[in-house]
Image (spheres, rainbow, N blue to C red):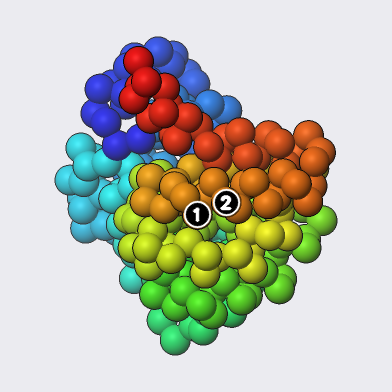
């Protein structure tokens, strides 16, 4: 997501009228549109009084990757408007702006992990794919720092949720390796610590959740392949349905690739 070439191609593929709509607060419909948004222009549009210094700092960061610009935008807004700006951002039409709200949750001081998860939950259940990604990316450092508590909270309150988006957050937010985020070394070394979250999702009916759990185990297989093989064998025996089969196939894909390469 942070590659400048990807961003350049995206901007060039979007017409001037559509780009102006995105920079004025319209919701993006594709990843390309997400990457094409001019953060400074959008910030000036939705918060006219944000100040020249904030806009200048945002413009100066224009060449940085989007994962660096998202928390910066949230900090600039929070510093000038305070915590009350969260509600405005969280309910804005722009998915980028709602993403900034995710990082306001992450940056908030004096908030317990349970309170932080409660605040991020509506954004984790957002209708837009981009906001849902920013939700877990934003709070992941807090989950990694308080891993056992995070696993307990996710297992108790998130994995049973009727929303597939919320259940998927439980798995995706603590993947050992993840995408566009720092790894969690403790789970690379001891993936079994996350079983309270993974076990309830092993036969989840949603492909969205299945993909996340399968990817979680594929991450773990890069460091603990024997553990993943044993776990998927047990799951397959205990839940011989298509949902678990799909999860296990996805979980074992790196091991299967290595095995094929070794015998070629």
Is residue 186 visible to us here?
Answer: yes
Quadrant of the rendered image containing residue 179 = top left
Residue occupying the point 57% across, 71% down: 151
- As drawn, the residue found furthest toward the left would be 60
Residue occupying the point 45% across, 35% down: 255
Is residue 96 visible to us here?
Answer: no
Above or below 24: residue 122: below
Above or below 108: residue 201: above
Q: Which residue is mark 1?
A: 227
Judging depth in this view, the residue of 134 and 88 nearest the camera is 134
Judging depth in this view, the residue of 168 and 55 nearest the camera is 168
SS label for mark 2: helix
Residue occupying the point 41% across, 28% down: 259
Residue 118, horizontal then vertical, whole percent: 63, 72
Q: Which residue is mark 2?
A: 230
Q: Judge left or right: residue 53 versus residue 94.
A: left
Quadrant of the rendered image containing residue 240 = top right
Judging depth in this view, the residue of 149 and 134 nearest the camera is 149
Residue 173, horizontal then vertical, whole percent: 51, 57
Check disc 1: other Cα within 10 Å, few if <14, some if 14-19, many if 20+: some
Mark 2–mark 1 Cα distance, whole angstroms, equals 5 Å
Check disc 2: other Cα within 10 Å, few if <14, some if 14-19, many if 20+: few
Residue 96, horizontal then vertical, whole percent: 48, 44
Q: Judge left or right: residue 116 versus residue 109.
A: right
| Tag 2–tag 1 contact (CB < 8 Å) | yes
């Amino acid at each position: 997501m942070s590659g400048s070439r990807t961003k350049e191609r995206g901007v060039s593929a979007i017409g001037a009228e559509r780009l102006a709509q995105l920079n004025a607060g319209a919701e993006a419909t594709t990843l390309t549109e997400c990457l094409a948004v001019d953060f400074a222009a959008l910030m000036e549009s939705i918060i006219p009084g944000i100040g020249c210094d904030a806009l200048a700092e945002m413009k100066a960061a224009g060449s940085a990757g989007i994962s660096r610009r998202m928390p910066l935008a949230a900090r600039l807004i929070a510093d000038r408007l305070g915590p009350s700006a969260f509600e405005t951002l969280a309910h804005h039409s722009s998915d980028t702006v709602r993403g900034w709200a995710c990082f306001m949750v992450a940056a908030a001081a004096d908030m317990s992990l349970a309170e932080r998860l409660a605040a991020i939950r509506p954004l984790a259940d957002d209708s837009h794919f981009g906001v849902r990604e920013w939700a877990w990316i934003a709070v992941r450092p807090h989950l990694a720092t308080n891993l056992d508590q995070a696993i307990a909270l996710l297992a108790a309150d998130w994995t049973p949720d009727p929303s597939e988006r919320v259940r998927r957050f439980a798995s995706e937010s603590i993947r050992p390796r993840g995408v566009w985020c720092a790894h969690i070394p403790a789970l690379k070394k001891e993936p079994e610590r996350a079983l309270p979250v993974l076990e309830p999702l092993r036969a989840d009916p949603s492909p969205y959740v299945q993909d996340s759990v399968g990817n979680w185990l594929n991450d773990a297989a890069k460091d603990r392949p024997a553990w993943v093989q044993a776990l998927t064998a047990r799951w397959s025996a205990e839940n011989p349905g298509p949902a678990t089969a799909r999860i296990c196939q996805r979980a074992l894909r790196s091991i299967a690739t290595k095995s094929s390469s070794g015998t070629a």
